[in-house]
Image (cartoon, rainbow, N blue to C red):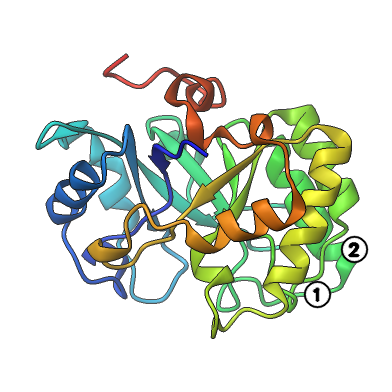
């Protein structure tokens, strides 16, 4: 399978990652990626950057060391209504937005109904391109509803390397990812493989998502990693380098 995208990564700015933006770009170039996404944790994640960081991303070039990049955020879903921790005024100026559930930020009802509602509402948010790691068994999801909504709203569902790596702190991720892929194939929802790299050496690493895709015999045409052109169809606005 052709794999030229890694859209979900973090730098020192996220507070618990270990390389700079420039170091991540250098590694992405070495890996032959068509585009690298830098998506720092949004402000409700302990230790991450202030909202001013995201408001000032216009100052950063979108080509570094010859590597095309997208600059955005990994938003925190805060409740069953799908509220997130950056304002629309900031989101409209970002290149890409991922929405994820993290234990420090989603403190309310964690029933399947509440978690599924959070994801479905996030899919309706016009600024959100990707649902990040919807595979954590601590936050149960109705994957059939999610696949249908993702298809209908042109939202990508993520297969996350960090989640699927053996020893991950998330629960039952492989089984959940397989169930999600089952419904994505059934309803024609598209997925994206991302590293969720917090260190430069992990950029572009999608070994475990690849394994699950191959095990399921999941259709390659439903995985956007093979085409930069296909991926950019899901963005709210064209990247500056197109």
Give x and y (percent) for residue 24.
21, 53
* Residue 115 visible in image: yes
Q: Which of 33 and 141 is in front in this view?
A: 33
- Residue at x 87% of width, y 35% of height: 187
Q: Nearer the viewer, mark 1 or mark 2?
A: 2
Residue at mark 2: 113
Give x and y (percent) for residue 158.
60, 50
Give x and y (percent) for residue 62.
22, 31
Q: How crowded is mark 1: few (under 14 residues within 10 Å), some or many (20 or more)?
A: few
Q: Look at the numbered disc 1 and give the secondary structure of its residue.
A: loop
Residue at mark 1: 109
Give x and y (percent) for residue 166.
55, 80
- Residue at x 89% of width, y 47% of height: 145
Q: Residues within 10 Å of mark 2 (few under 14, many from 20)?
A: some
Residue 137, quarter of picture: bottom right
Q: Which of 97 and 137 is in front in this view?
A: 137
Instruction: Mark 1 and mark 2 in contact? Answer it, CB < 8 Å.
Output: yes
For the C terminus, the image quarter is top left
Above/below status of 120 relative to 137: above
Q: Which of 66 and 41 is in front in this view?
A: 66
State the CA–CA distance, disc 1 to disc 2.
Answer: 9 Å
- Residue at x 71% of width, y 58% of height: 215
Q: Look at the numbered disc 2 and give the secondary structure of its residue.
A: helix
């Amino acid at each position: 399978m052709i794999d030229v995208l890694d859209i979900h990564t973090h730098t020192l700015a996220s507070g618990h990652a270990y390389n700079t933006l420039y170091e991540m770009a250098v590694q992405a170039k070495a890996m032959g990626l068509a585009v690298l996404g830098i998506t720092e944790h949004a402000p409700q994640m302990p230790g991450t950057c202030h909202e001013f960081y995201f408001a000032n991303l216009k100052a950063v070039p979108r080509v570094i060391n010859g590597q095309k990049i997208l600059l955005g955020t990994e938003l925190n879903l805060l409740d069953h209504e799908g509220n997130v921790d950056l304002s629309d005024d900031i989101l409209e100026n970002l290149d890409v937005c991922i929405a994820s559930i993290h234990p420090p930020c989603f403190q309310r009802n964690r029933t399947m109904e509440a978690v599924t509602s959070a994801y479905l509402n996030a899919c309706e948010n016009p600024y959100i391109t990707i649902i990040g790691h919807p595979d954590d068994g601590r936050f149960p999801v109705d994957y059939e509803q999610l696949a249908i909504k993702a298809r209908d709203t042109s939202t990508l569902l993520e297969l996350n390397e960090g989640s699927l790596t053996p020893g991950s702190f998330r629960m039952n991720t492989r089984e959940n990812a397989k169930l999600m892929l089952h419904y994505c194939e059934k309803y024609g929802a598209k997925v994206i493989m991302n590293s969720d790299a917090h260190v430069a050496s992990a950029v572009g690493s999608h070994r475990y998502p690849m394994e699950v895709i191959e095990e399921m015999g999941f259709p390659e045409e439903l995985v956007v990693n093979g085409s930069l052109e296909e991926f950019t169809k899901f963005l709210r606005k064209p990247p500056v380098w197109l």
